[in-house]
């Protein structure tokens, strides 16, 4: 793939995000043979463009780490992307649906490390030893592609649909919990829409952080201490509508909520 094509495709996705207009996936006809490594180059370019515009990366996110998400999106390999400062929604606050294309939410387990982790051989045990805190979170995803329809390279190029993050303020040491059996319910206006347990995320959300460190090591990067890390949706994602009160409740790990307005 030529360098100018990478730039053009990054601009294509960036435009959709800025204008909140859905676009046809890259692999439909623009570039059917897009590979995973090319898709990460487009993502890097997109991240650089956003940074040049003054947005700041606050942390990495993993995606497609649970069976529920693999089935829902019909893709089957974990991927990573980045959450930016302007995507953060304060717990208990509201978002305007008009700031998104077709947003969905998914409950996730967040991590904050006390020291950097570098792959390629990081294990879940390394992660748990290096973890300062785990916390509850809700990710807002908003694929820039029509009907959330994409292949794995498409969604990587689109920064893994990252659009918002609500970080809970309930912090626990991972040793205080058995993360794999922490249950999670996701409710909208008091009705449970989806549920699961930490084990849905690659057996244990700590495995997701290890996987992230190992994937990042391929480009000489590491998972950094102090950054909030999203480990991937525990359950399938749920579409949002104006008037929704969204709440994720975790066994032993508190809860996190926000509102959706017009
Ligand atoms: C891709 C983003 C996946 C997760 O937690 O699995 C993701 C999508 O479903 O649009 O963030
Ligand atoms: Mg997610």
Image (spheres, rainbow, N blue to C red):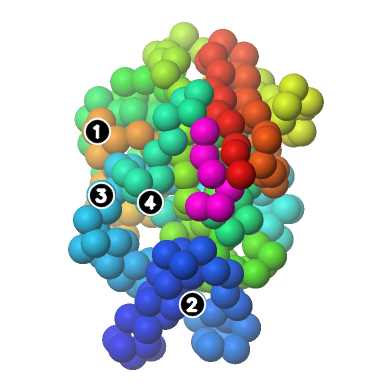
Is 121 rendered above or below residue 227?
below
Task: Tell me which label, 1 or 3, sits earlier in the chain.
Answer: 3
Within 8 Å: ligand 2 and the Cβ of disc 1? no
Magenta stretch, residue numbers: 94-99
Q: Secondary structure at mark 1?
A: loop
Q: Is residue 167 left or right of residue 243?
A: left
The residue drawn where x is 52% and y is 87% is 31
Task: Tell me which label, 3 or 2, sits earlier in the chain.
Answer: 2
The residue drawn where x is 32% and y is 44% is 85
Query: Could you say which disc has been placed on residue 195 in the image?
Result: none
Q: According to the image, label 3 marks what residue?
A: 56
Return the x and y of residue 14 as percentages of the image width and height. 40, 69
Callout 2: 10 Å neighbours few (<14), some, many (20+)? some
Task: Tell me which label, 4 or 3, sits earlier in the chain.
Answer: 3
Q: According to the image, label 4 marks what residue?
A: 82
Query: Could you say which disc has been placed on residue 225 in the image?
Result: 1
Q: Nearer the viewer, residue 146 or 94?
A: 94
């Amino acid at each position: 793939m030529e360098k100018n094509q990478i730039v053009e495709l990054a601009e294509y996705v960036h435009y959709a995000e800025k204008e909140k207009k859905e676009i046809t996936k890259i692999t439909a006809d623009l570039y059917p043979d897009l590979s995973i490594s090319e898709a990460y180059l487009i993502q890097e370019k997109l991240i650089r463009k956003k940074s040049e515009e003054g947005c700041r990366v606050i942390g990495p996110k993993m995606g497609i780490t649970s069976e529920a998400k693999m089935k829902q999106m019909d893709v089957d390999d974990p991927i990573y992307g980045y959450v930016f400062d302007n995507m953060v929604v304060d717990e208990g606050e509201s978002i305007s649906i008009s700031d998104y294309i077709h947003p969905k939410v998914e409950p996730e387990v967040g991590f904050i490390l006390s020291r950097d982790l570098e792959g390629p051989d990081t294990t879940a045990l390394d992660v748990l030893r290096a973890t300062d805190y785990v916390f509850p979170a809700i990710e807002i995803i908003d694929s820039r592609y029509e009907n959330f329809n994409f292949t794995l390279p498409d969604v990587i190029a689109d920064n893994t649909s990252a659009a918002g993050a609500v970080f809970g303020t309930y912090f626990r040491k991972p040793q205080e919990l058995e993360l794999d059996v922490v249950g999670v319910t996701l409710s909208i206006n008091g009705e449970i829409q989806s549920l699961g347990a930490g084990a849905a995320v690659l057996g244990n959300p700590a495995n997701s952080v290890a996987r992230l460190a190992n994937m990042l090591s391929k480009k000489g990067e590491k998972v950094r201490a102090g950054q909030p890390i999203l480990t991937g949706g525990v359950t399938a994602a749920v579409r949002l509508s104006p008037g929704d009160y969204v709440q994720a409740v975790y066994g032993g790990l508190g809860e996190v909520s926000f509102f959706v307005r017009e």
